[in-house]
Amino acid sequence: MNPASSHPNPPPPSVQTVRKLIIDVVDARDLLPKDGQGSSSPYVVVDFDGQKKRTSTKYRDLNPTWNESIEFEVSDPEHMDSEELEIEVFNDKRYGANSGSGRKNHFLGRVKLYGSQFAKRGEEGLFYVPLEKKSVFSWIRGEIGLRIYYFDQQVVAEEAPAQGGGGGGGGQPPQNQPPPEEPVPNQERPRQVMVVEEARVFEVPAPMENVHDGCHSPPVVVIGESHPQHHHHYPQQPPLQPQAVHYHHSENLPPQQQQHHEDSHSHQHPPPPEEQFLPSVRKMQMGRVGSSGGGERVRVLRRPNGDYSPRVISGKFGADQGERVHPYGLVEPMQYLFVRILKARGLAHNESPYVKIKTTNHYVKSKPASHRPGEPTDSPDWHQVFAITHNRPDSASTTLEISVWDLHSEHFLGGVCFDLSDVPVRDPPDSPLAPQWYRLEGGAADQHSGGVSGDIQLAVWIGTQADDAFPEAWHSDAPYLAHTRSKVYQSPKLWYLRVTVIEAQDLHIAPNLPPLTTPEIRVKAMIGFQSFKTRRGSMNNHSASLHFNEDLLFVAGEPLEDSLVILVEDRTNIEPHLLGHIVIPVSAIEQRLDERHVASKWFPLECRGGGGGGDGCVPPGRGGGSYCGRIHLRLCLEGGYHVLDEAAHVCSDFRPTAKQLWKPPVGILELGILGARGLLPMKPKGPGKGSTDAYCVAKYGKKWVRTRTITDSFDPRWNEQYTWQVYDPCTVLTIGVFDNWRMFTDGSDDKTTDCRIGKVRIRVSTLESNRVYTNSYPLLVLLRTGFKKMGEIELAVRFACPSLLPDTCAVYGQPLLPRMHYLRPLGVTQQEALRGAATKMVAGWLARSEPPLGHEVVRYMLDADSHTWSMRKSKANWFRIVAVLAWAVGLAKWLDDIRRWRNPVTTVLVHVLYLVLVWFPDLIVPTGFLYVFLIGVWYYRFKPKIPAGMDIRLSHADAVDPDELDEEFDTIPSSKPPELVRARYDRLRMLAARVQTVLGDFATQGERVQALVSWRDPRATKLFIFVCLLITVVLYVVPPKMVAVALGFYYLRHPMFRDPMPPSSLNFFRRLPSLSDRLM
């Protein structure tokens, strides 16, 4: 017997994926001298995941260059984003003046980074980080240059021998295989994970506070019944497949779909629509369905039409809830009957079979079956999942009918019937239900004629929107799947492309120019739909080169497939003359993350033929032309800026483009979109009727979410829940509701747009930490016909973050925008133009998704028209300024009441307080801060109970003139008749005249102050300087406390000692001359 044959073949070696982290320590700049000789000998210590390594020491160098790479192995790649990388810089005392002492190495600074800031290999870039202090008393300066990236490496792992002896273990391990490493006890640390979002771990305090606040408006009458809670008990054994019963064929099935309106007291729960993301993210964003239902929803009467403020709604987050709220339990569970149709076999003769699914209240049809290649036509495939709204207490005695029909002949091919009381219930942790084969049956006539035969493979179960099959299922309330399904979108990664045009040489300029005429040469740069031109180039007398020295900024979006086209044009004549061009791929342009210098390059210009730069230049994008000059450019993609695509006052994200510069998140924002109430009809449906097919869109940061569309319902219930990472609490979450029109065109008509129903904004900083807000917000929209309330939306919001920890509080002391916005700021006009380009790119990107997010939806969510002219907005901003200055007006009025002795007791107390402050002036500043503290404590009683929504009074939407609204919605250029445009222009001129008068008054007061010593009025200046001399003598002679008391008592004197006429000082100031008499 062959001994080799007694042992089975060894299994193939297992391959494991190991993640490597590389830290390139490039250099440091402007370090602090700490060796006692005016210098330092620095080295760097890098600590990551319990591993510590260091670089070499650079002898006496305050600007050292290392260019050393340090490699770490990531022990837990899934939680790498939460790992901390600490980089410390020290001065090596061995090279200093006190090298013989026993002191430790001097600390020169440190940097803390997190795994979320690491880039993949190929996407890394050099960035400089300022060195931070270790304590308050540290003296640190300088910055360090780093390049950090990671990559995954496939390694062959050695198979461990089976325990307990056994065959196959006689072979010796390979010689080159290293021994297995023992686990380090220090690295095994337990974590109490409370909230996980996008592979980021947060430890949230255990107590979660639930909100059920009242509102300021009077209470309303509540009418409704409290239904008893239904408890369903299911056996603990594994769920069995439903048993099929004999199918009785019905001749006439309803050809149309019966619309089902859910009861307002039904139990509902959150869906996970993010089907294109990782399973961990989907699992994280799906709410776990509890075994017990929440509290019953109570029908609340609508308030009067004049009340447009948010209100607290009842539900599962009432104050009487004793259990702790699940981290993702913001919405209510919704029961669905899931039917998975896979395939059939042995069907009777047919051409194109399809499946009908019918319950008491619902009726849906599948798509026509597809036949597998090489298989007979009696074995079709469907592979579809249907989710039918299911109310278990009402439908416990109903049946589910599944039948197969021929599409062309409408011939019945068989069916199967299920009793819904026997259908198993599946919770998300359970494994998917295995499909089974069921025998197709029919009536007696069908069985004898042979028209019914074969089997169908399917699975039936009851679940919620947390089920794995829910995102891909066909819903009974959303028949148009392509444009009604829920979806998660990601905005494209946008960069600023900086093009610095420095110089152009060897241009072939036309020689036949008129005398004393300088050629007008301009450079035009284009990328996609964006186009900018430089100013006129200046020519040097000593050379034929043209100098521009001008920056042009563009917005470029990944995957950076566009090309930058540079055109050099001669615009001396009326018709521009092309002198040369060059095409540069954007992907080949260098990226920078800070303000470091980027090297400039010379690029040859191309044109067709043998030069001359004639009219026959090749179109941009084609090469092979002859040399016709060169241009000096500096190109770079700016990763240190935040590309604004939203209005600055409602921005949801301020992170820079480069991921390496991101700070760690401070919390998680959870949003539960419960539903809407009382929506108005948006489209006609028969005579005297209307319908609304509503869906909701929420946007925060780069992440967009879209709920499924609920068709033909004025009270849709979505119950979907989503989460976002929060990097800055001073940001805004935007939620919009729209009516779906695209589902009727299926994307074939680009002119069809979805109608806006309303929008709600919630500022994250107004939310208390770990507190659930369940409120109803009015959906307000401003139309050409005026302001209108379209309904209400019900939302549940929670901001999960540690309260008042150093990381959370430190955010308020950091700059709002990234560092590059302050080192190389952008102009207001330039920023607005770039924002328009970014908005257009985001809208184009999301429009290519499936289902598409329309450009009108994106522009409405991003407030693309927020800076357009509006008389209503101008009035609103003016009254906002008046409201801000109201405290000063109130203080002046209070002082006037004091000095007029309206309340003698208060006036006497003010006299006493004034005397105390004059005699003890060191109490003035502490008293002022104490007063501010007491004001803050007093106003704590009036703090907002719920996040505020849209304010119609603040927006001046309730009393706007119709003509002003028509002007606000007018296009640019105007599409109105000339007479109307002329009338609006005259009205604008009248308003501008008032503004002009106010500005002139401000200028007049300032010029009168200057006239005090400018000798424009010699007599007034003589009087003023003489009074100043007199005041100086008095203040030298009289003690200042006596002067202060005298002036204060004189100001607060009794009205019987006052003259009703203006004082002499005010009369003197008003008589001073200004420059208004010199205006033409």
Image (cartoon, grey):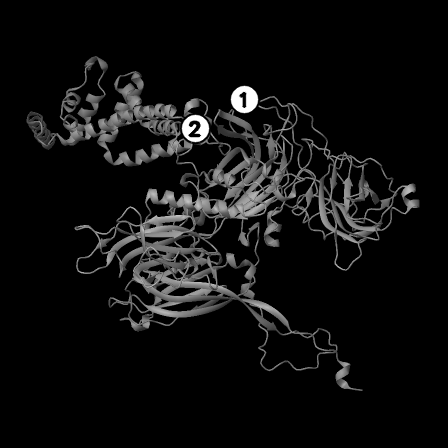
Front-lying residue, 990 or 73? 990
The quadrant holding residue 96 is bottom left
Q: CA distance from mark 2 to mark 1?
A: 17 Å
Q: Is residue 676 depicted above or below 722 in this figure?
A: above
Which residue in the structure is indicated by mark 1? Answer: 305
Using the image, tell me which numbered label, if any, was put on residue 955.
Answer: 2
Relative to 706, 247 lies left or right: right
Q: Given the image, on which type of amino acid does mark 1 rest? A: Asn
Front-lying residue, 887 or 846? 846
* Quadrant showing the N terminus: bottom right
Front-lying residue, 192 or 28? 28
Residue 184 visible, this angle: yes
Label 2 secondary element: helix
The quadrant holding residue 98 is bottom left
Q: What residue is at 33 percent from the left and 47 percent from the top?
A: 826
Residue 802 visible, this angle: no
Q: Given the image, on which type of amino acid does mark 2 rest? A: Ser
Front-lying residue, 1031 or 524? 524
Image location (x, y in percent) of residue 854: 53, 41
Relative to 298, 1056 lies left or right: left
Q: What residue is at 57 percent from the left and 52 percent from the top?
A: 193
Image location (x, y in percent) of residue 246: 88, 43
Relative to 887, 739 lies left or right: right
Relative to 503, 723 lies left or right: right
Q: What residue is at 30 percent from the left and 50 percent from the top?
A: 534
* Quadrant showing the C terminus: top left
Image location (x, y in percent) of residue 528: 43, 51
Using the image, tell me which numbered label, if any, was put on residue 159.
Answer: none
- Residue furthest to the top in view is 1056
Label 1 secondary element: loop
Q: Closer to the N terminus: mark 2 or mark 1? A: 1
